[in-house]
Amino acid sequence: MTSFIHNEPTSLSILQEAKIPQTLLASLSKDIPASTDVAINLPGAFGAMCLNSAGLEMITKEFHFKKFFDIFTSLPHVRAFQDNDVASTLGISMDELVRHQPTLKPSVMEEIVIMLKKVLKMCGPDEISDADKVLCSLQKTRAADAPALGVVVEEDVNKDDRKDCLVAQLIEGAARVRYGRIMN
């Protein structure tokens, strides 16, 4: 839909009459799939929908950006975005959206602040599981069975498939969104 609208902007009103953007927003208001492909394309879709006044009004009245920024505090989303630079890309894309649609800036900025506060709360000592505390703790000494420094060893096949602790993933994602928004 986004490419179609950007290639032929006059088609937006036709798509709006067919209720396609409204259906997308209604679907996203219920659930945003934990998919990098979906997340990466959302800011562009929002921008395409805002190319006319009816679309801008639809975005501001029918979709709350809270739902979009909740993906940065949703564990399935955070883990899905772990291996990609999705958060930075989304920060840059949201910056572009608010530059083209300045009326959206106050609500987007408000939701970024709320998201950052939520990440901070989620990373508080009462919210972290014991498993994540162990994964995040710094060791003061090297384990007796650790290989010598500089020695490369094969990955343990039974190793926990999480790469980092949840706290690090949450903070990194939030920081990348904010960095992308500031740097662009």
Image (cartoon, grey):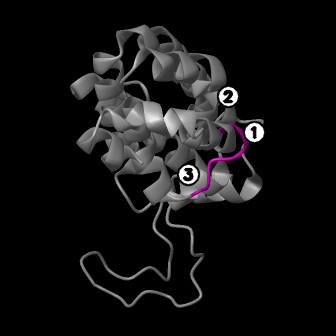
**Relative depth, front residue between 181 and 48:** 48
Q: Can you tell which mark lies on residue 78?
A: 3
**Relative depth, front residue between 101 and 178:** 101
Category of crowding for the residue at label 2, using alpha-carbon neighbours closer than 10 angstroms: few (below 14), some (14–19), many (at least 20): few
Category of crowding for the residue at label 1, using alpha-carbon neighbours closer than 10 angstroms: few (below 14), some (14–19), many (at least 20): few
Tell me which label, 3 or 1, sits earlier in the chain.
3
Q: Which residue is mark 2?
A: 121
Q: Which residue is mark 1?
A: 127
| Residue 56 picture location, percent across and down | 47, 19
Query: Picture quarter containing residue 43?
Result: top left
| Residue 33 picture location, percent across and down | 61, 55
Does dot 1 land on a helix, a strand or a loop? loop
Q: Can you tell which mark lies on residue 84?
A: none
Residue at point 27%, 84% (across, down): 151
Q: Amino acid type of disc 3?
A: Val
Tell me which label, 1 or 2, sits earlier in the chain.
2
Does dot 3 land on a helix, a strand or a loop? helix
Q: Is residue 127 magenta?
A: no
**Relative depth, front residue between 5 and 101:** 5
Query: Picture quarter containing residue 161?
Result: bottom right
Region rendered in magenta: 29-34
Residue at point 48%, 23% (across, down): 55
Specify whether residue 176 is in view. no
Is there CB contact under 8 Å for labels 2 and 3?
no
| Residue 145 picture location, percent across and down | 49, 83
Q: Amino acid type of disc 2?
A: Lys
The alpha-carbon separation of the residues under discs 1 and 2 comes to 7 Å
The secondary structure making up most of the magenta span is: loop
Residue at point 61%, 35% (across, down): 22
The alpha-carbon separation of the residues under discs 2 and 3 comes to 16 Å
